[in-house]
Amino acid sequence: MLKFNSLVFIFITLISSCTMSTTNNTQMITPVSDVHSFAKPEEAVITHIHLNLEVNFEKHILEGFARINFKNITGTSHLTLDTRDLDISKITQGEEEQETTFSFGENNPLLGKALTIDVEKNTSVVTVYYKTSPTAAALMWLTAEQTAGKQFPFMFSQSQAILARTWVPCQDGPGVKFTYSADITCPHSLMALMSAENDTLLHKDGTYHFNMPQPVSSYLMALAVGDVRFHSLGINTGVYAEPVMMERSIYEFDDMQKMVNAASALYGEYAWGRYDVIVLPPSFPFGGMENPRLTFATPTIIAGDRSLVALVAHELAHSWSGNLVTNATWNDFWLNEGFTMYFENRIMEKLYGRDYADMLDELGFNELQETVKELGETSIDTHLFLSLKDRDPDDGMNEIAYIKGQFFLKTVESVVGREKMDVFVKKYFTEHAFQSMTTEKFIAYFNENLIQGDTAISNKIQLEKWIYGPGIPANTFRVKSTLLEKASTQAKDFLAGTLAKDLDTKGWSTHEWLHFLRNLPEGLTKAQIAELDKKFHFTPSGNCEILCDWFQHTIASNYLPAEAQLEIFLLNVGRRKFIVPLYKSLVKTAEGKAFAQKVYTYARPGYHSVAQQTIDELVN
């Protein structure tokens, strides 16, 4: 994910979230300051939410109620929840549903409003009757024309980081975990799916029942409704997709069961029952979202050669790092993504070999260097532990948390050895399952269980520099890919005058092509661009990863033959990883900015709100 620009907001409330353990059905509460939530879980904490909602495609709303079970820890007379743009008609308390009073706090453009519900001290359940706004930031409503099949509408949610509050009244901080269930009613021709136990068959009455028996954070609640079908890929894996996308999806995800088996062999049994993937329409703003039991995936990874399935390995790895052991606040985001990137690469190595994994690592490290250069080598935003007060947590969702976090763990492995590292990581996941983790708590656990007082090892790792220091530490473990080295050599040869037809590119994967393109300077001549395009057919390529890098070259060189395909790409792809750099390249010139504004006028309705927010600032 690419970073957002900062959003400054006026009113910040410091609240506490909690670390919870479900061992023996008890909860351990450890107050943690969370500046992105109004909730007060140290007083009263949610334990379960049951949703009963109707999906209304005509009005673009969800309507119904949320029955919320909570534990009143301090005997408080108030339950505080996070909401944003919810229309609440009434709230009741108790199983007998006696209507109660409630009030909203001051509106905050980013955080929404605190909802304070008056409760009796012995009350353990409230029911909130509400409907969402047609412009709820978490919900994307697509017309039939915006889907792959072009026949039925589609909707999906994207709750990360703090958007769950726009469709469910909840304690919307990652440190609060709860179970949930749901009854969802939708048009009879469509299937509803959630990040829960799902049915694989279309229900003719349009009503679906869901249960999530493991506790999850609010950002992992997810709903999708559309014309989708299911295909099994293994013992506990499968794919949901629109019928027109099913055959390609089955082929692309053929190794998914192998991934689950490989991951479980590395770091412990898969804890969520099933691991399924739903391929969403192109407007999904991210590569994937690790919603438990049901990963949401962009169709841009359907490349036809299984070369982009590292994304599936990444979202699967989140089943341990993120979903099982969760960052307590968004300042601790690196604990989710650094571990996941490290784990993802281990899965890829186990399935496809060390050379392939090294290739992915070097590409990632190059992206990290670019991000550090963009943010500034001394910027506080290049620390692993973030400082997101007064800011959107999406500001921290970039290569620092992901790849700097990954290379911190690779550096640790290089110091202590892989065998010792694997024992530590598996123990970390096992002992903190279904709990949240702060950076401070992790450091203490790391020192106690891995460093164990060994000063020499501690000095080699330099933990404090990695977590609380800027840039890329000098002791970082470096990977050198022989496959990418060959690709960079071919790029140098082309620049030196070798004709494109004489380059040695036989058998290249997507990653080698990306490295080749990234080793070509900005501003190639039109003749060079045309020669490459004639030989390798980049412009009509169906590979979105390659197209994104290629179009940045065509924009810089004002290569007009690619303009029509660039427009089609921007109109049909909503993944921020691709569209943000392309719009950034376009707005560098007056002609490019005019083109970007023209295309964006038509493309914007098909983009998710998190993408709209970023592109609005670029083109206006």
Image (spheres, helix red, strand yellow):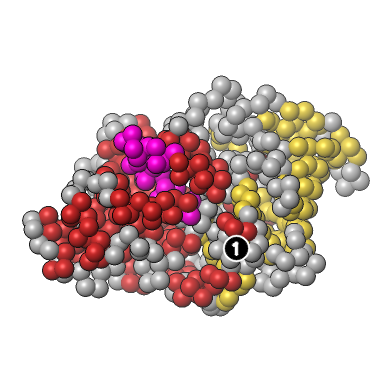
Q: Is residue 248 above or below residue 381?
A: below
Q: Main secondary structure of the magenta part?
A: helix
- Position of the C terminus, as image quadrant, is top left
**Residue 276 painted magenta:** no
Q: Is residue 207 left or right of residue 442?
A: right
Please report the residue visible at 39 percent of the width from the left and 59 percent of the height from the top.
Answer: 544
Along the line of sight, the residue nearer the viewer: 387 or 453: 387
The extreme left residue here reads 496
Number of numbered discs present? 1
* Quadrant of the rendered image containing residue 594: top left
Q: Is residue 587 magenta?
A: yes
The local secondary structure at tag 1 comes to loop
The location of residue 526, given as percent across then percent down, is: 20, 51
Residue 252: image location, x then y, percent: 45, 72
Q: Is residue 303 above or below residue 166?
A: below
Name the amino acid type tagged 1.
Answer: Lys
Q: Magenta residues?
A: 572-597
- Can you see residue 245? yes
Which percent across, then down, holds residue 395? Answer: 45, 37
Q: Which residue is mark 1?
A: 150
The percent coordinates of residue 232 (x first, y second) are 57, 76
Q: Residue at x 71, y 52 (%)?
A: 57
